[in-house]
Image (cartoon, rainbow, N blue to C red):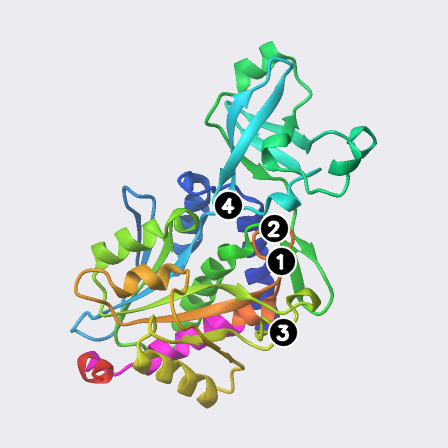
Amino acid sequence: MLNAQRQGAREFLSLLSISSGVSGYEIAIASLVMERFKKLTDEVRCDTFGNVYALKKGNSKSHKKIMLAAHMDEIGLIVKGIDPRGFLRFTSIGGIDQRTLLSQEVLIHGRQVIPGIIGSVPPHLLANEDYDQAVKMEDMTIDVGLSLAKIKELIQVGDTITLKRETYPLLNNVMAGKSLDDRAGVVVMMVCLEELSRLQHLHDVIAVATTQEEEGIRGALTSAYTLNPDLAVAIDVTHASTPDTKGQVTIELGKGPAVALGPNIHPAIYRQLTETAQEHRLPIQIEPIPGHSGTDAWVIQVTRAGIPTGLVSIPLRYMHTSVETLDMQDVLNSGKLLAHFIASLPDDLEGFLCY
């Protein structure tokens, strides 16, 4: 059972990872999410902002609503100009790390999908003072190997660009790829829904794949306002330690999801998540966040009259690059933790959430 679930989660994450869905242009990725969630829930719909809602009904007649939120958009690029010689100028959508762009393979989503490569002046032609400097995005271009006339037939200013990257399996159940931030969170919701099909839960669960998180946490704001849930948990990624973090990061890959606490987090939700992990022997890590969490949880918490909100994060190395790296067991454990948390919630949510 576990191996089958792990394989299914890995395959779905791979499918989501290689798909296109830059912030504001999530329609293709939304279709994949809707197709998968229809098999696990009672109702799936999409709103005018592009958010996907998947409802799994609970057993209580009170119809209290539990919102899960994970963003499905990715950072990317957009065409801002076409050079007379047939090279594309571009800029970023979201916080892409420009140091990692040079020599990347890309896909331009024009009238058809066009492959290209990001290039710049070769090192042999650089002045001595520029040799050791990182190349700036404005000094890079995309070469698609086409004439200017053909480019104008297929590509226009405003077309989005994504990095071309297959997911790559490493040893010990570790996986690398692009846009695992936060499509891994969407997979966590899938695992949670699978687990809930074998558990009893009182309250309705609405898993929301949100849009435009990378450009201002917008989809979470509109979807939380629409649902006005009684309780919410956001699922995102968090930095996992590497040698170059030099002690700034304490969360580690493969040691379980990070459960956040701090002013962005309702204390009852934090407490119940940690107690649920202990009861079901699920590994977790504690992540103190003293201010802005930088996730969907930030806007959900202050929507309408305020929504009690929690945050569960998947440890991730090399965030906002094309080789984001995670441990699939952390993904599975995140989904299981959320499922058991939801199943443990009492009918009296008001009393449970009372300070």
Mark toward the start of the polypeptide (4 vs 3) = 4
Residue type at tag 1: Tyr
Mark toward the start of the polypeptide (2 vs 3) = 3
For label 3, the crowd category at 10 Å Cα-Cα, with few meaning under 14, some 14 to 19 and many 20 or more, is few
Main SS of residues in magenta: helix
| Mark pair 2, 1: CA separation | 6 Å
As drawn, the label of residue 247 is 3
Label 2 sits on residue: 321
Numbered range of the magenta stretch: 333-349
The kind of secondary structure element at disc 4 is loop
Q: Give whichever of 124, 72 is nearer the camera.
A: 124
Q: Give whichever of 276, 42 is nearer the camera.
A: 276
Q: Position of residue 175 (x, y in %)?
A: 65, 60
Picture quadrant where residue 139 is located:
top right
Residue type at tag 4: Ile
Label 4 sits on residue: 75
| Mark pair 4, 1: CA separation | 14 Å
Q: Tell me the mark number nearer the camera, choosing from 4 and 3.
A: 3
The kind of secondary structure element at disc 3 is loop
Q: Tell me the mark number nearer the camera, choosing from 2 and 3.
A: 3
Q: Position of residue 36 (x, y in %)?
A: 44, 53
For label 4, the crowd category at 10 Å Cα-Cα, with few meaning under 14, some 14 to 19 and many 20 or more, is many
Q: Quadrant of the N terminus?
A: bottom right
Residue type at tag 2: Thr
Label 1 sits on residue: 318
